[in-house]
Structure formats: structure tokens, C-alpha cells
């Protein structure tokens, strides 16, 4: 009889401990993250119903929705997504180039060129032609860009690089007297291309992060953004927590990828 009572007590304790530990295992169901080569592919998969949402830089998401009204997508932010700043990445040892680019960035902001380029892509759309550089320094820098990220960098109908970042680096080059060669480079290999000497700088809507700053040096910030969540209009998804248990697409190794991964980690706490 005592033996039976001991087993019953042990079973009760075990059940209580199991329930307690289960409650410590996290406050929500994990998001299933699907990683894509580029953001437009992820957004297309969302339109086709293969995933439930996409997390990506706000200007890119809004540009896609503007250019694809038939997609029936909507987008929103979340207070947990911090503001982020884009910078031009260069090798850490290229100190003179850092100074040259930062000086050029400062000048195009002061003389109104930056505002004209910004207005072209994010304002009323008034056209603005960046002047050609006279290349008085006699040097051409290879600039890596992942040209699948409109409106920052993309290939236009004529097969030429176009976008906010393209115009900005051309404007800096014209101001400071060097030439640029814009090189379409896959995102996964864009920092290795810089560090390996195949590019001299990167301007590709790249967020300044502590992790990246361990291997490259960034210019002064040139653009402020945040992450947006894109969903179908009738999805019922209204906030970040609604993504729990859903399939969410991101471009691999981007800030959107990091943001939703961090959210998943928070659900384990």
C-alpha cells in the first residue's frame, strides 16, 4: 500500500514538473522561415499563395506593391523593428577611399543633388539626370550591387543599371572626380567580392550592422529605413504576432532575415 502511494505521488510530481517546464519553453509557435535569393521572388511566392508573408526593407516592399497593384498586397511595420541605416561598404584598409566617398556624400547632400535623386525615386517622381564624371582623378572603381532590389538598384528596360543607389554613387563620383563601374553581384557573394578585390565598394541598400562592420568599413549613413511585413489583403494578418505558425519569406542574409529570426528567438524565451 505504501509502495502504491509512493508511485502515485511520484507520478503527480512528474506531471506537475512537465507542465511547469512546458510553460517555460516559449510564449508562441515558431515562424517557419523560407529564404529566397531575392526579395521580388519572395513577394511573387506570396502572391502565388506559397507563403503567408514577406519581411523586407520598407521601400522595396512599397515599390513592389506600387508597381504591382493587381497583387492585392498590403504592408505594415511593427514597433519591434528598429530603424536601420544604409551605408556604402569599403575595405577597412582603404582609408583614402573612405574619406573620398564621405566627402562626396556630404557635398551632394549640401548642394541639393541628394534631394533631387531622393525625389525622383521616393517623391513626386520628377526626373533628374546625374551628370557624367570628368574622372579628373583618372581612376575607376568597381561598385558591387545586387540589381534585384528596386527602387535602389535594378536593370531597366534598356538593360542598364538604374535606381537610387546607382544615381547616388554616380553623383558622388561626378562630385569628386572619379568613375564607377557598376557590377551586378549576387547578395550572398557581395561582401566576399569586396574583400576578395573584385569590387572596391558596395552600395546596395546594405544596412549598417555591427556584424558587417567587423569585416568592412561603412560610409556615413545615406538612407533610413525599417522592415515591413507584406501580406495578402484578405489574410487576416495584422501584426507581427499573427505570423506565429505561418510561412514567412525573406531574402537570405538580409536584415529582414535577421529580424524575423530574432523574433523566433524571442518566442523561445
Image (tube, helix red, strand yellow):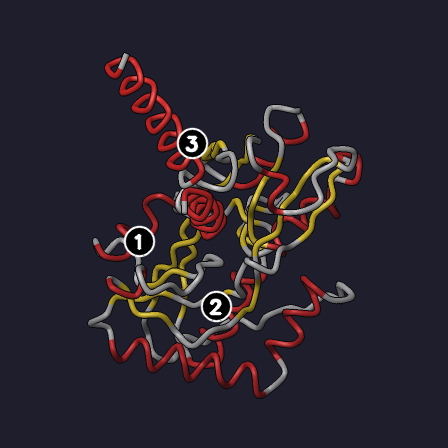
Residue carrying label 1:
191
Q: Is residue 152 above or below residue 99?
A: above
Q: Is residue 35 above or below residue 130?
A: above
Q: Earlier in the sequence, mark 3 or mark 1?
A: 3
Task: Give coordinates of residue 42: x percent, y percent.
Answer: 56, 35
235 or 168: nearer the eye?
A: 235
**In the image, which is nearer the foreground, mark 2 or mark 3?**
3
Q: Quadrant of the N terminus?
A: top left
Q: Residues within 10 Å of mark 1 (few under 14, many from 20)?
A: many
Q: Are marks 1 and 2 in contact (CB under 8 Å)?
A: no
Q: How many marks?
A: 3
Please tell me whether mark 1 or mark 2 is closer to you in this view.
Answer: 1
Residue appearing at x 48%, y 68% in the figure: 169
| Dot 3: element | helix
Is residue 94 shown left or right of residue 88? left
The residues bearing labels 3 and 1 have C-alpha atoms spaced at a distance of 47 Å
Point 61% across, 46% down: residue: 240
Mark 3 — residue?
19
Mark 2 or 3, nearer chain start: 3
Please provide percent x and percent y for residue 260. 49, 45
Q: Residues within 10 Å of mark 2 (few under 14, many from 20)?
A: many
Q: In front here: 24 or 43?
A: 24
Contact, CB < 8 Å: mark 2 with mark 3?
Answer: no
Residue in the image at 62% along x and 55% along y: 78
Q: Position of residue 125 (x, y in %)?
A: 75, 63
Task: State the separation of the CA atoms marked 2 and 3.
Answer: 58 Å
Residue at (33%, 26%) from the top-left corner? 14
- Percent across and percent down for residue 11 are 33, 21
Residue hosting label 2: 169
Q: In the picture, residue 113 is in which quadrant?
A: bottom right
Q: Secondary structure at mark 1?
A: helix
User: Residue 39: which numbered mark, if any?
Assistant: none
Amino acid at each position: 500500500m505504501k509502495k502504491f502511494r509512493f508511485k502515485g505521488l511520484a507520478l503527480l510530481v512528474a506531471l506537475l514538473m512537465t507542465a511547469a517546464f512546458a510553460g517555460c519553453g516559449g510564449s508562441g509557435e515558431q515562424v517557419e522561415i523560407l529564404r529566397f535569393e531575392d526579395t521580388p521572388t519572395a513577394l511573387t511566392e506570396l502572391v502565388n499563395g506559397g507563403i503567408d508573408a514577406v519581411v523586407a526593407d520598407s521601400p522595396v516592399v512599397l515599390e513592389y506593391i506600387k508597381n504591382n497593384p493587381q497583387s492585392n498586397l498590403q504592408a505594415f511595420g511593427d514597433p519591434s523593428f528598429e530603424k536601420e541605416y544604409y551605408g556604402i561598404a569599403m575595405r577597412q584598409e582603404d582609408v583614402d577611399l573612405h574619406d573620398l566617398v564621405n566627402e562626396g556624400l556630404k557635398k551632394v547632400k549640401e548642394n541639393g543633388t541628394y534631394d533631387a535623386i531622393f525625389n525622383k525615386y521616393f517623391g513626386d517622381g520628377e526626373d533628374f539626370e546625374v551628370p557624367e564624371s570628368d574622372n579628373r582623378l583618372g581612376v575607376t572603381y568597381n561598385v558591387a550591387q545586387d540589381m534585384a532590389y528596386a527602387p535602389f538598384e535594378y536593370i531597366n528596360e534598356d538593360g542598364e543599371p538604374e535606381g537610387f543607389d546607382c544615381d547616388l554613387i554616380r553623383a558622388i563620383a561626378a562630385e569628386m572626380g572619379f568613375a564607377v563601374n557598376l557590377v551586378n553581384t549576387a547578395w550572398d557573394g557581395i561582401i566576399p567580392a569586396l574583400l576578395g578585390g573584385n569590387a572596391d565598394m558596395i552600395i546596395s541598400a546594405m544596412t549598417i550592422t555591427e556584424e558587417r562592420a567587423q569585416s568592412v568599413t561603412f560610409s556615413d549613413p545615406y538612407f533610413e529605413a525599417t522592415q515591413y511585413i507584406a501580406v495578402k489583403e484578405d489574410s487576416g494578418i495584422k501584426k507581427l504576432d499573427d505570423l506565429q505558425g505561418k510561412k514567412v519569406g525573406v531574402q537570405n542574409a538580409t536584415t529582414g532575415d535577421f529580424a524575423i529570426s530574432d523574433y523566433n528567438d524571442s518566442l523561445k524565451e
